[in-house]
Image (cartoon, rainbow, N blue to C red):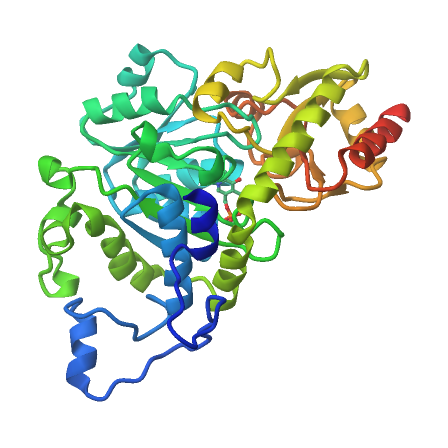
Amino acid sequence: MFNTDCLHGGYRPENGEPRNIPIIQSTTFRYETSEDMGKLFDLEAEGYFYTRLQNPTSDRVAARICKLEGGTAAMLLSSGQAASFFSIFNIASAGDHVVSSSTIYGGTYNLFAVTMKRMGIEFTFIDPDCTEEELNAAFRPNTKAVFGETIANPALAVLDIEKFAKAAHSHGVPLIVDNTFATPWGCRPFEWGADIVTHSTTKYLDGHAAAVGGAIVDSGKFDWDKYADKYPGLTTPDDSYHGITYTKRFGLGGAYITKAVAQLMRDFGSTPAPMNSFLLGLGIETLPLRMERHCENAKKIAEYLNNHPKISWVRYAGLKGDKYYELARKYLPKGSCGVVSFGVAGGRTAAEKFMAGLKLASIATHVADAKTCVLHPASATHRQMNDAELEAAGVSADLVRLSVGLEDAEDLIADLAQALENV
Ligand code: PLP
């Protein structure tokens, strides 16, 4: 079950072996013969030869996340950005098109709208609250994937995963869901029809702001062979791997991740350090306990802010009356997450004054770790966006994003109260 898998998933020590996932801090692995090593290069045998591609510490932690999400294969990456990039570039190239929710993390938006556009991949950004007709109208013959965030950062919009999965599948493409804010404790997108899940493990999975990292998990459910002409990279021989056809050799459960490791990790090298993977594995051990507390604290704070005269609006899907309350009840029944967005009456200037007055919560470009932090996205993570893009991303100029940590809720509320007094 979930709590047990957080502790034991992906690693069961044999007699006399370390109880913790060992940190294999080695770039290379020794073999008796060149023939043995050759088999690894040809993907004919399983094993490790060079940490840029695979490392036992990282693989064990990837297997833990795979289990938690209910997938068939998973990989770790050096960052969430790398995970978002790989998840799409593994199945799309120049001349292709992707449909994405517009309320995604600012860094992901920039990656898609600017950097990947320069690589020849075009994105259509669509309001996640759109109708099914509007969503279907965004597809083109060259669309290769649909992308969205379970809980959007920082707009806190909850994705109607079933609606997005239905549209993706009716156009013969997979749905990729960034499950960073919800974590598999809160939502398992595969159970609602998503095909691939990504994570910035930097957030709740690690949980302690100790290591930047990413993960991709495959559900194994998307039938690449059925749409073979759309996904030739998976369904026709790969010349860079001696003619291997990934779906034939590794089946639907293993093809996507094996290709991402064998080709993209080989060529881009977005490899996590084994030490970081270890820290991630350790963090996951307490994920359920932490998420419960994050959600409990965030709900108390959202309620407090909602009743405060100097707060103009509050967005928290766990708050009754919130625009996403019903979707959250469906997709996030245990609680949404620890992040609360709100506006301070008086707009941007008031928001900045309020933030400067906080004593316990620190101003940080981070969310989703044990200690409470706060950010003004319009002047930080989303500052590359113009006003129209900010609006589409659900980020108003007065939006303050509070990442509620594991402190005593009373201390946090006292901090908010004293900072608001001076606004
Ligand atoms: N996805 C989401 C939802 C995020 O919040 C972030 C970072 O904040 C990322 C992806 C990118 O992850 P990283 O910062 O680990 O590269």
**What residue occupies the far bottom of the structure in this picture?**
32
Instruction: From the viewer's perspective, tell me whether residue 294 is left or right of residue 147.
Output: right
Instruction: From the viewer's perspective, tell me whether residue 208 is left or right of residue 11.
Output: right
**What residue occupies the far front of the structure in this picture?**
15
Q: In which quarter of the image is the N terminus?
A: top left
Q: In which quarter of the image is residue 414?
A: top right
Depth order, front residue of 401/115: 401
Q: Which residue is drawn at 14% across and 68% down?
A: 44
Q: Is residue 22 visible?
A: yes
Q: Is residue 398 visible?
A: no
Q: Is residue 315 above or below residue 227?
A: above
Q: Residue at x 46, y 71 (%)?
A: 22
Q: In which quarter of the image is the C terminus?
A: top right
Q: Which residue is drawn at 23% across and 55% down?
A: 259
Residue 383, position as x, y percentages in the image: 61, 35
Residue 175, position as x, y percentages in the image: 30, 32
Residue 377, position as x, y percentages in the image: 63, 33
Q: In this view, does 54 lie above or below 285?
A: below
Residue 306, position as x, y percentages in the image: 72, 16
Q: In this view, does 259 lie above or below 99?
A: below
Counting every numbered tag in the picture gives 0
Depth order, front residue of 19/323: 19
Q: In which quarter of the image is residue 398?
A: top right
Depth order, front residue of 2/92: 2
